[in-house]
Amino acid sequence: MEVKIIGGSIPNIPWEKKPEDINRPVWRYSENPIIGWNKYKEAARIYNSAAAYHEGRFVGVFRVEAMDGKPQLHFGSSPDGINWDIEEKDIQWVDEDGRSWIPQYSYDPRLIKIEDTWYIVWCTDFGGPTLAMGRTKDFKSFVRMENVSLPFNRNGVLFPRKINGKYYLLSRPSDGGHTPFGDIFISESPDLRYWGVHRRVMTKGNIGWWQMMKIGAGSVPIETSIGWLLFYHGVVNTCNGYVYSIGAVILDRDDPSKVKYRCSNYLLTPEKEYETSGFVPNVCFPCAALADPDTGRIAIYYGAADTYSALAFCEINELCEYIVDHNELNPGDDIEYR
Ligand code: BMA
């Protein structure tokens, strides 16, 4: 299958050849985890973080859990997308009126450039967890924008460009706790401030027991010749608690509320020790993916066991062929649902 990635080149995208003994489309980086416990004095765990490519280097917004157990967002940069230099001070937000704002907590950031501005969407407190948004042009000053949603909502992911003149954002309405339910929705906006025209994109359950209980968008969607490739997480509730795996779906390019292909198998499930044991065992949680159109290489960044940052790789043609071969939709996934 020939699929083209649409986007800027990333000549030094993190990459490692697929090992001979792997018969699946996604494989892990052999040096995982790329960030472990206690990276610097005040940091306990760094995971569920976002990375992107910017003018020859890599930039990231990291979920850093300090030793008081609270997460905040920290900026980081890297020459190779693997070895990260993460600022010890958290991002200092100033709102659009110039007032400083310190979030109660901040977690699961996604980072995306639209035109000449970088946007960060993450989960913060607003009388309960919901989606906050901020922007920066230089990764030095950060402006807090209006919250995207009312409580409760999580897993906010912006599309990297306007579609038919509108911005689009995926989200997952939740509860105030560990949310035993959840489907992926999409909203549109003319200006990144007013959100509406909500549609349901896809639902949990039925197809693949690994995504039985809830699903949530993961990486910023990658534009391809057959649609938007989205990595997401799917959760099953077991007698020993929730298990988070990584799955993939391809959304319609002109109307991303519609699913074209959805893979009934997970791509990655907790297997390695850094995924099955840590602060919260059995979590693989994707928050970013880089894609190089010249080589078809994709690097997926995921949090492991709410403790580590890890990397996995795949190749666009092989991955899309696998998704199409294992395509299975839930009722309503492929239509406009409102
Ligand atoms: C979700 C989020 C994620 C976390 C996951 C597993 O509700 O809070 O940040 O990785 O739970 O604990």
Image (tube, rainbow, N blue to C red):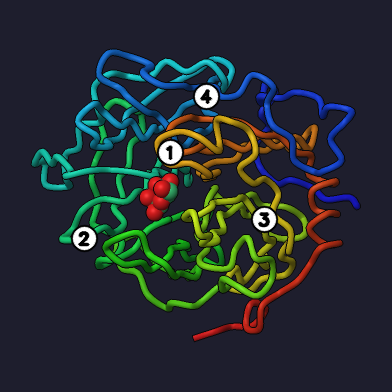
According to the picture, the residue beneath numbered tag 3 turns out to be 248
> Residue drawn at (32%, 42%), measured in percent from left and top?
135
Mark 2 vs mark 1, CA separation in Å? 20 Å
For marks 3 and 2 on the same chain, the one whose residue lies earlier in the sequence: 2
Q: Nearer the viewer, mark 3 or mark 1?
A: 1
Name the quadrant containing residue 64: top left
How far from the left and from the top, in percent, is residue 182? 46, 69
For marks 1 and 4 on the same chain, the one whose residue lies earlier in the sequence: 4
Left/right placement of residue 1 relative to residue 115 reads right
For marks 4 and 3 on the same chain, the one whose residue lies earlier in the sequence: 4
How far from the left and from the top, in percent, is residue 297? 75, 34
Disc 1 crowd, CA 10 A, few/some/many (<14, 14-19, 20+): many
Name the quadrant containing residue 290: top right
Mark 4 vs mark 3, CA separation in Å? 24 Å
According to the picture, the residue beneath numbered tag 2 turns out to be 128
According to the picture, the residue beneath numbered tag 1 turns out to be 306
Taking depth in this image into account, of 193 and 287 the one nearest to the observer is 287
Can residue 158 be seen here? The reply is no
For marks 3 and 1 on the same chain, the one whose residue lies earlier in the sequence: 3
**Could you say whether the residue bearing mark 3 is in a helix, strand or loop?**
strand
Taking depth in this image into account, of 101 and 126 the one nearest to the observer is 126
Q: Nearer the viewer, mark 4 or mark 3?
A: 3
> Residue drawn at (43%, 32%), measured in percent from left and top?
307
According to the picture, the residue beneath numbered tag 4 turns out to be 58
Is the CB atom of the residue marked by disc 2 within 8 angstroms of ligand 1's nearest atom?
Answer: no
Mark 3 vs mark 2, CA separation in Å? 29 Å
> Residue drawn at (48%, 30%), measured in percent from left and top?
308
